[in-house]
Every structure is written in C-alpha cells, then in structure tokens.
Image (cartoon, rainbow, N blue to C red):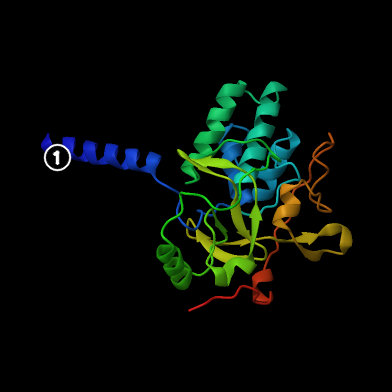
Amino acid sequence: MKKIIIIALMTLACNVQSKDAKPPIGQPVIREGDLAIKLVAAFKLGTTTDEAEAENIMGNIAIAPRNGWIADYPVTPDIVGELRQSISDAADANRLNVKKDDAIKIFQETITTSKLAISGNTPGQTSDKGPNNDNAPAITVINNYYNTEGPPIVTYYAPPPDYVYLYTWVPHPFWWNSFWYPGFYVLGDFHRPIVIHNRVVVVSNHFLYPRAGNRIVRVDPMGRFRGKTYGGIAVPHYARRYMYRGGPVRGYHERIPVVEKRHK
C-alpha cells in the first residue's frame, strides 16, 4: 500500500511540475503532417497514417493553417493559433461532429499530448513587446545548449550573439503553461532528418513548388506568419476556396547545402 501511495504522489508531483514548467530551450518538434494525422484520429474523421491523406481530410472541412498545410514544417505557436481558429470556425459551421467547446478541448489535448503546452492568441496578432522576456534561462545555460546541441529549430529565448543571424523573430504572443511569451524565434533556413517513433522523417522549411516545375523553395517564417500564399499549397486566408496541402521534399536532405553554422 505504501508503495502505491508513493508512486501516486510521485505521479502527482510530476504532473504539477509539468504544468508549472517553462518550455525547454529547443521547442519539441512536431511536423504539421504528423499533427494532421493525430487530429484526424482525435476528431474521428477516419483512420490513416498517411500525412497527405490526413491533410486532405482536414483541408476538406477547412481545418488548416491559414496558408495551407506544409507537411514537413514544424508546428510553431502561430500555427497552433491558426489551427485553433479554423477548428473553432469548423465547429460553428457544423463541419465537425462535436460542439465548439468540445472541439477546442480535443485540439488542446492533442497539442498537449504532443508535448506542446501552447495556448492563446489569434492568427496574425502581434506583440507590442520586444523579443526579450523575464522567463529566459541563464545565458550560460543557453550558451551551453547551443554549443552542445547546436541551434534549435524553434526557441522562445534570444539566441547567443553568434547565432542571432540564423533566426527570424516572429512577434506572435502566446502562453506556454502559465508563462507568457511575446513571440518566438525560428531558423530562417533548415532541413533536418529526425527520428519520431522509430522512423526517420524530415523537418524542413523547404518544399516543392508544383507551379514552377517542382522547383524547391524556402518558406519565410515572417512571410508565412503574415499570411503569404505559397504557390501550389494554399490560397489567401480570406478566400473560401479549398486550401491545398504542401508536398514534402523527399530525399532533399541528401543534396541540400549546409547553411547552418555550428559553433564549438
């Protein structure tokens, strides 16, 4: 009995800690394609493990980032806000089989189980505060992380001076648990293979441009934040037409030039 009580108390302590914990220096990475698969299952819209099919299922009921799904792109705080808004609109329009409050709850639970404790703020909203905040770890902790792990794809803390040029500041305010952030940093150019659930996938801001002979183009973080439409994957956010999904760049990591500078 004592052992059961101790385990229960340890579990409760972990849960309390997680709710009060600040985000890590490198935001946990979840690709939009993987999130689409999770949302299809969460809303009971079908059964699929194919990200293209999942994105199309969600797109058919107008649930997508406001400039379309990009399978290999990481889910950033502004994308969370845009998806939350599109889910709210879909519930209001009776395109989901649940009510609005339940739909938002399902979405938030899906985000949380993906290790993203992000909430708040509407698409396109900008912060009136600069990138500095009071929640950052000590500068020595940040420096050690960059020197050991390299530059994270997404971070909420100001990068060390030697790495600032690699990043774009996106002024989308949000909450991580009980901590408020005026925006986030994202690498301006990245294409990395990572392992998720024993499979190798790519996280990238490069994608195929179908309308230009499948030319590979780069997604600008601020351009996407401002609602820029990329040919072949989206329509303007004010349009009511179908939002096309973005195609992943298969095998591109084998021939992309190295553009990220890593310091030792």
Q: Which image quadrant for residue 159?
A: bottom right
With respect to residue 73, does 237 lie above or below? above
Residue 49 makes an appearance in the image: no
Of the pair 100 and 242, the residue shown nearer to us: 100
- Which residue is rendered at x = 70% and y = 58% of the image? 248
- Which residue is rendered at x = 74% and y = 34% of the image? 62
Q: Residue pushed farthest bottom?
A: 264
Count the marks.
1
With respect to residue 221, does 1 lie above or below? above
With respect to residue 63, does 245 lie above or below? below
Residue 80 in the figure: left or right of residue 140: right
Q: Position of residue 64 (x, y in %)?
A: 70, 40
Of the pair 238 and 8, the residue shown nearer to us: 238
Residue 198 in the figure: left or right of residue 129: left
Residue 186 makes an appearance in the image: yes
- Which residue is rendered at x = 88% and y = 58% of the image? 211
In which quadrant is the N terminus drawn?
top left
For label 1, the crowd category at 10 Å Cα-Cα, with few meaning under 14, some 14 to 19 and many 20 or more, is: few
Residue 2 in the figure: left or right of residue 36: left
Residue 208 in the figure: left or right of residue 76: right
Q: Position of residue 237 (x, y in %)?
A: 79, 39
Q: Residue pushed farthest left?
A: 2
- Identified by mark 1, the residue type is Lys
- Which residue is rendered at x = 72% and y = 53% of the image? 222
Which residue is identified by label 1? 3
Assign a secondary structure to mark 1: helix
Of the pair 120 and 12, the residue shown nearer to us: 120
Q: Position of residue 161 (x, y in %)?
A: 56, 69
Q: Position of residue 165 (x, y in %)?
A: 64, 68
